[in-house]
Image (cartoon, rainbow, N blue to C red):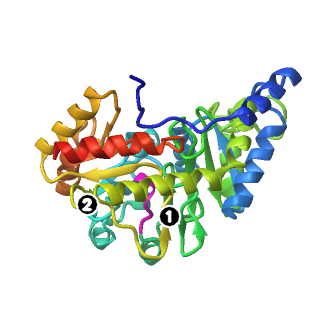
Amino acid sequence: MNKIPVYEPYLDHNEKNLVVDCMETTWISSKGGYINKFEDLVKNYTKANYCSSTSNGTNALHLALLALDIKKGDEVITTNFTYVATTNAILYVGAKPVFCEINKTDLNIDVSRLEKKITSKTKAILYTNVYGFLCNYDKLKKIASKYGLYLIEDAAESFGASYKNKMSGTLGDISTFSFFGNKTITTGEGGMVLCNNKKHYDKIAQFKNQGNSEKPFFHDVLGYNYRMTNIQAAIGCAQLNKIDEIITLKAEIYYKYQQLLMGKVKFLEKLEYTKPSFWITPVVFKTKRQKEKVVKKLLDNNIETRPFFTPIDNLSFYRKSNCNIANEVFELGLLLPSYPGLSEKNQNKICRLINTTL
């Protein structure tokens, strides 16, 4: 019985051809024409002013905070329900993450509770578009502007999503993407920082390149090796050429799950003026026991699922918060296979097994 994974990248001969080109021309490291080309493609797609590629999404978040001069003694308000890289990046620069509760409807940060978290030490709001569903950007921007805070968008899961026709990746002072193997488009590993401020862009470019100055082999600041390789960028170029196809296929899969599992599980609710990326299909069960039975049934049939994010304050190196909704949905939530190449036959099988188990 063939395994049905929770996710796999959507690859074809185009990625292979561009990687072979890198090898044949010997441009395999962090220099080469595909790097600038990929950055330009992302810039044109998102309409961002500046794009800087990175070796992964975690590095992109770290660079965003460095560019904004977030440091020890500062506080950054963020969500308790995200991948750990989001909040780890705050610790990397010595700042303190302050957790805000999430909404039950879309699992994103609850904007109505944000202002109570702001103190004299608050420097930024770092929000995540969880599972590809967009936050209320207008309200976030209004609060950030009112208090003079930076707004940072973690768009790791929302490449291709849009808010009132404004692309994810431009919904903040600085935004970041991840291009890990399970993301909407992939470069294997890889990331991107997007911004509209030339000063921020220049700082990002320097920090990611070992702190190099314009003078060869002279380093003005303590930097990092966060550069994307030409091979990674080549894969990204091939991926971006079929982004519309990928998102269309993923949307079809999401809505088919909604149709076939209606009344059995809960689905996230998108804001009416947003278009999600449909990165993956999250569902919420009525009880933990229901979820456990479905996970076992699917696993017995060689079908992979994935649990929801572990709430960050459950991890030993973070301080406990009062974000109860995150802990509740963690117990009840599950991610279903949602990759673009998922066949209708296999999706029907998954839904049939879930329906007969509940």
State the residue position of label 1: 150
| Residue drawn at (46%, 37%) of the image | 7
The stretch in magenta equals: 131-135
Q: Identify the residue at the far front of this view.
A: 345
Q: Quadrant of the N terminus?
A: top left
Residue type (three-letter) at the residue carrying disc 1: Tyr
Residue 316 colored magenta? no
Residue 81 x/y as whole percent: 31, 50
| Label 1 vs 2, first from the N-terminus | 2
Q: Quadrant of residue 99?
A: bottom left
Relative to 226, residue 115 above or below? below
Q: Nearer the viewer, residue 15 or 353?
A: 353
Residue 229 x/y as whole percent: 71, 31
Residue type (three-letter) at the residue carrying disc 2: Glu
Relative to 104, residue 291 above or below? above
The crowding category of the residue bearing disc 2, from other C-alpha atoms within 10 Å (few below 14, some 14 to 19, many at least 20), is: many
| Residue drawn at (37%, 45%) of the image | 348
State the residue position of label 2: 101
Q: Is residue 330 left or right of residue 97?
A: left
Residue 250 x/y as whole percent: 50, 52
